[in-house]
């Protein structure tokens, strides 16, 4: 059963049909009880009326019971005055008399009014068992339902005659009431079954129609699931149609949420692909940068091996090997530092005297590049920032080295200290427009706009990585004659 009603359509239809059935059964039960109460009340009124007629009969067990004591009594009983208890009674009316205080001992008598010949009422004498059953009822005039042997269910009321010598009983069968209620219940049951069948058919159609948008949403999800997302450049262009993304409806909320998810997946996949491309390019650039010194070392080593007796050639070879080894060592150390920063390895945190660090760095730059104009702007108070002194010194050194190597002689370089960081400004030719957006990428070099002086393109990448590790940011604003690199520390 659980598997059969696993779908949302089935569960909704079953729920709707169950509600229809429960409501219909409740209405049917209330209706049947109301009708039975109403008809029962009418039947009790008729029983009381019949009892009042029987109470008006003169004392005596034979008056009005089908055994007239006088020859001039009318057929069907009655006294000399013509008072007939059957007059005005319906077929099935029961009347019975029981002696209470008479001088003579008379057996209880009673009849049930039947349909006689020629349309005149007749009667049927009650059996002893029936009379005994009636005799056991309380004498209070209240109708009670009694099962009489051979007659069925009756509503009977018992009271006394006007003189009190006899008690009289009157009753009516409940067959008509029971028949009406039974017919009503049968009709209601049939209508409830038909209503449930119609509700199931109509509900299935309506629910399927209303849930059809969910099928379209599911088709979109299946289409995306079939895309190869494991590698390569991936553009998830599948989207839920706009008419299924109305957030005012439940289906629209699902569609809008799926579109948001697909957009997030698409952005993530694009970022992953871009990262993969950067890694590939990084490995290619690193291999290229390492291949040149390795080739040089191999060449000069071969030269020294072929000329073992040439001391000058050997000395030159050793010098070149040492130079290229130092170059490879610096490159490998930079790559290792970038890898450590990318892995999120924490740096040391202590108060760093940024003023002193800038003074020393600018002083070194003046010695290395006397043909440049170096300016240092410091606030009156000493600037201290929290961070790793060695790495912050590397940031300043890389920025000044970048300005020194890639600007012509006579360029003015201004270093400004701020409470939250520093700024390096120069009036050189600036970054080419096509290079500026990628200036902080690894192995990015502005060869076309600045004179290359042996860099490998990791200086600004290290600046950005170290600044980010300190919780800060670095930005570049470059145009001819006005290049500014701003470092803000967190």
Image (spheres, rainbow, N blue to C red):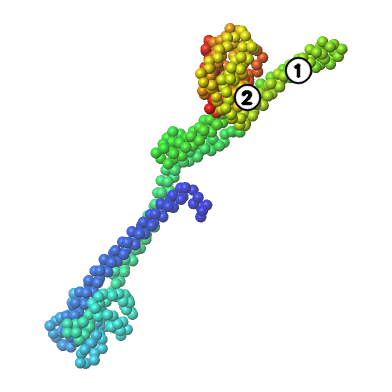
Image vertical order of residue 469 relative to residue 203, above or below: above
Please report the residue visible at 23 percent of the width from the left and 74 percent of the height from the top. Answer: 47
Question: In front here: 306 or 413?
Answer: 413
Residue 35 percent location from the top left of the image: 28, 64
Residue 154 falls in image quadrant: bottom left
Please report the residue visible at 19 percent of the width from the left and 84 percent of the height from the top. Answer: 164
Question: In front here: 29 or 358?
Answer: 358
Marks 2/1: CA distance? 26 Å
Q: Nearer the viewer, mark 2 or mark 1?
A: 2
Image vertical order of residue 144 relative to residue 18, above or below: below
Q: Mark 1 or mark 2, which is nearer the start of the sequence?
A: 1
Q: Secondary structure at mark 1?
A: helix
Please report the residue visible at 49 percent of the width from the left and 48 percent of the height from the top. Answer: 7
- Number of the label disc, if any, that sits on residue 322: 1
Residue 457 falls in image quadrant: top right
Question: In front here: 369 or 323?
Answer: 369
Of all residues shown, which one is farthest toward the bottom?
104
Residue 356 falls in image quadrant: top right
Question: Can see residue 249?
Answer: yes
Horizontally, is 274 left or right of 314 in the view?
left
Of all residues shown, which one is farthest toward the right?
309
Q: How many marks?
A: 2
Query: Are the residues flagged by discs 2 and 1 in contact, CB closer than 8 Å?
Result: no
- Number of the label disc, if any, that sits on residue 390: 2
Question: In front here: 221 or 179?
Answer: 221
Image vertical order of residue 293 relative to residue 411, above or below: below
- Number of the label disc, if any, that sits on residue 400: none
Q: Secondary structure at mark 2?
A: helix
Question: Can see residue 428?
Answer: no
């Amino acid at each position: 059963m659980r598997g059969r009603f696993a779908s949302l359509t089935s569960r909704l239809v079953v729920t709707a049909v169950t509600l229809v059935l429960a409501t219909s059964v409740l209405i049917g039960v209330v209706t049947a009880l109301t009708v039975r109460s109403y008809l029962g009340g009418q039947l009790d009124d008729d029983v009381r009326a019949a009892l009042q007629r029987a109470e008006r009969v003169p004392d005596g067990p034979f008056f009005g019971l089908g055994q007239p004591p006088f020859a001039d009594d009318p057929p069907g009983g009655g006294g000399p005055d013509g008072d007939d208890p059957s007059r005005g009674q319906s077929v099935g009316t029961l009347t019975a008399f029981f002696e209470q205080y008479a001088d003579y001992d008379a057996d209880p008598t009673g009849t049930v009014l039947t349909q006689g010949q020629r349309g005149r009422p007749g009667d049927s004498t009650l059996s002893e068992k029936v009379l005994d059953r009636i005799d056991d009822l309380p004498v209070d005039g209240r109708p009670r339902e009694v099962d009489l042997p051979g007659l069925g269910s009756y509503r009977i009321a018992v009271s006394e005659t006007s003189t009190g010598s006899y008690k009289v009983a009157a009753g009516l069968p409940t067959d008509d009431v029971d028949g009406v209620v039974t017919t009503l219940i049968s009709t209601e049951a049939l209508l409830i079954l038909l209503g449930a069948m119609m509700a199931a058919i109509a509900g299935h159609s309506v629910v399927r129609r209303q849930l059809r948008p969910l099928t379209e949403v599911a088709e979109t999800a299946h289409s995306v699931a079939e895309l190869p997302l494991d590698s390569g450049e991936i553009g998830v262009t599948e989207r839920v149609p706009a008419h299924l993304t109305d957030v005012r409806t439940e289906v629209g909320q699902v569609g809008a949420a799926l579109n948001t998810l697909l957009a997030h997946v698409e952005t993530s996949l694009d970022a992953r692909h871009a990262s993969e491309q950067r890694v590939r390019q990084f490995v290619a650039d690193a291999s290229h940068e390492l291949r040149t010194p390795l080739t040089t070392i191999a060449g000069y080593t071969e030269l020294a091996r072929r000329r073992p007796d040439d001391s000058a050639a050997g000395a030159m070879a050793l010098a070149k090997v040492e130079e290229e080894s130092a170059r490879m060592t610096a490159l490998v150390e930079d790559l290792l530092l970038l890898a450590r920063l990318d892995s999120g390895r924490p740096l040391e945190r202590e108060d760093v005297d940024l003023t002193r660090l800038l003074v020393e760095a600018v002083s070194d730059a003046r010695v290395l590049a006397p043909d440049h104009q170096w300016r240092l702007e410091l606030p009156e108070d000493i600037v201290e920032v929290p961070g790793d002194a060695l790495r912050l010194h590397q940031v300043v050194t890389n920025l000044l080295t970048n300005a020194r190597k890639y600007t012509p002689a006579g360029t003015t370089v201004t270093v400004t200290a701020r409470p939250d960081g520093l700024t390096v400004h120069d009036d050189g030719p600036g970054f080419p427009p096509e290079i500026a957006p990628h200036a902080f990428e690894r192995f990015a070099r502005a060869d076309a706009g600045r004179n290359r002086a042996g860099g490998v393109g990791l200086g600004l990448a290290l600046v950005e990585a170290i600044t980010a590790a300190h919780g800060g940011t670095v930005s570049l604003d470059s145009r001819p004659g006005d290049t500014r690199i701003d470092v803000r520390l967190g």
